[in-house]
């Protein structure tokens, strides 16, 4: 039986009612794969968001560090959605599942082609990073380069999901990639608490207010991890976007221009780790339904092509801010 086999809507409502709420039987599953997230109607109140953590993925201590980071950010008026505290606790257990409750915040993704939105995100990231550097994570992951890439590649190969005829090319590519990523150690750069997964799906705008959401992958690492994922389009577009982000970021914190050479390393890390994540979770019935293309030869052919493109990118001159 997979991790969430026993997580029924009845159990979700029972878990929430164990904390003193009265559910109105409206339970809607939201788009989440790593955890299970539900919008739950509450009698005479606004609906709540209930996040049920994947068993065995995080320790209680690491989840509480995520929650404490969110609470610290909210206290400093950084626009995050912090967990609800009940009797000074944010992490609860019911029926063998750990869960947390959050207020509901709807909205839409920002337009990253819009300079005003990018500059705004840069300002909020700087404030998030100012708080993130005040104390380190103890129980959350640390973001590494070659070590993370190699570990993810081992996971892919051990899963048995990659066709055998791709193994030699994949192994060779990973070896060549790590030869380049080994040249720059992420640990030589300042390590701070980060959001860790700052893609557009984790940014919402509601009533002209921007919210940074889903800190499930928060980690200790270089500030550039929260910046590079905001880039899109061509290399020239990346350069323009970096300038706009840096303008907003610099209003509250020095922009880490020295970390720009980390961008392609972090991008490569994400590509390899995404394939490893899908490999690890393939026994969860939600994954073959959501990602049916993952088991195909075409996917692995395109994956190797993406890695070859990253190997080429790692050999290019990194982005740099213009000097005025």
Image (cartoon, rainbow, N blue to C red):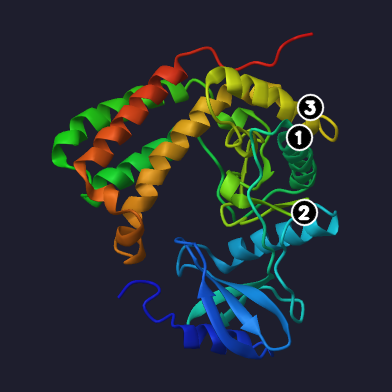
Mark 3 and mark 1 lie on one chain; the one further toward the N terminus is 1
Q: Is residue 54 left or right of residue 3?
A: right
Tell whether label 1 touches label 3 (CB within 8 Å).
no
Mark 2 and mark 3 lie on one chain; the one further toward the N terminus is 2
Q: Which residue is mark 1?
A: 116
- Above or below for 148 versus 17: above
Could you classify mark 3 by the number of other residues whose Cα lies within 10 Å: few (under 14), some (14-19), or many (20 or more)? Answer: some
Tell me where residue 298 sits by quadrant.
Answer: top left
Q: Is residue 66 left or right of residue 34?
A: right
In this view of the protein, can residue 39 be seen by the observer? yes
Of 168 and 59, nearer the camera is 168
Residue at the outermost top position = 324
Q: Which residue is mark 2?
A: 79
Residue 266 % position (x, y)? 52, 33
- Above or below for 125 versus 313: below
Tell me where residue 162 sits by quadrant.
Answer: top left
| Mark 3 vs mark 1, CA separation in Å | 11 Å
Q: Which residue is mark 3?
A: 247
Residue at the outermost left position = 165
Quadrant the C terminus occupies: top right
- Above or below for 168 versus 9: above
| Mark 2 vs mark 3, CA separation in Å | 19 Å
């Amino acid at each position: 039986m997979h991790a969430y086999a026993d997580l029924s809507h009845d159990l979700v409502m029972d878990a929430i009612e164990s904390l003193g709420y009265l559910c109105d039987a409206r339970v809607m599953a939201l788009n989440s794969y790593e955890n299970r997230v539900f919008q739950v109607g509450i009698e005479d109140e606004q609906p709540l968001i209930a996040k049920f953590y994947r068993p065995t993925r995080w320790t209680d201590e690491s989840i509480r560090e995520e929650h404490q980071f969110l609470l610290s950010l909210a206290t400093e008026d950084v626009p995050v959605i912090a967990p609800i505290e009940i009797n000074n606790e944010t992490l609860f257990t019911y029926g063998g599942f750990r869960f947390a409750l959050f207020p509901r915040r709807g909205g839409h993704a920002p337009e990253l082609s819009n300079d005003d939105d990018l500059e705004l995100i840069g300002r909020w990231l700087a404030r998030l990073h100012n708080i993130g550097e005040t104390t380190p994570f103890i129980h959350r992951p640390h973001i590494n380069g070659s070590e993370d890439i190699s570990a993810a590649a081992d996971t892919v190969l051990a899963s048995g999901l990659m066709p055998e005829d791709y193994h030699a090319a994949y192994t060779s590519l990973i070896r060549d990639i790590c030869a380049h990523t080994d040249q720059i150690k992420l640990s030589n750069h300042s390590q701070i608490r980060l959001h860790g997964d700052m893609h557009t799906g984790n940014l919402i705008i509601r009533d002209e207010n921007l919210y940074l959401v889903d800190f499930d992958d928060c980690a200790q690492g270089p500030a550039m991890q929260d910046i590079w994922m905001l880039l899109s389009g061509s290399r020239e577009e990346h350069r323009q976007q970096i300038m706009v982000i840096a303008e907003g970021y610099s209003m509250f914190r020095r922009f880490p221009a020295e970390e720009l050479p980390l961008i392609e390393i972090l991008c490569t890390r994400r590509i390899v780790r995404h394939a490893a994540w899908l490999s690890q979770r393939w026994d969860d019935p939600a994954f073959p339904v959501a990602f049916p293309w993952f088991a195909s030869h075409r996917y692995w052919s395109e994956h190797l092509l993406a890695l070859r493109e990253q190997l080429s990118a790692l050999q290019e001159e990194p982005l740099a801010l213009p000097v005025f």
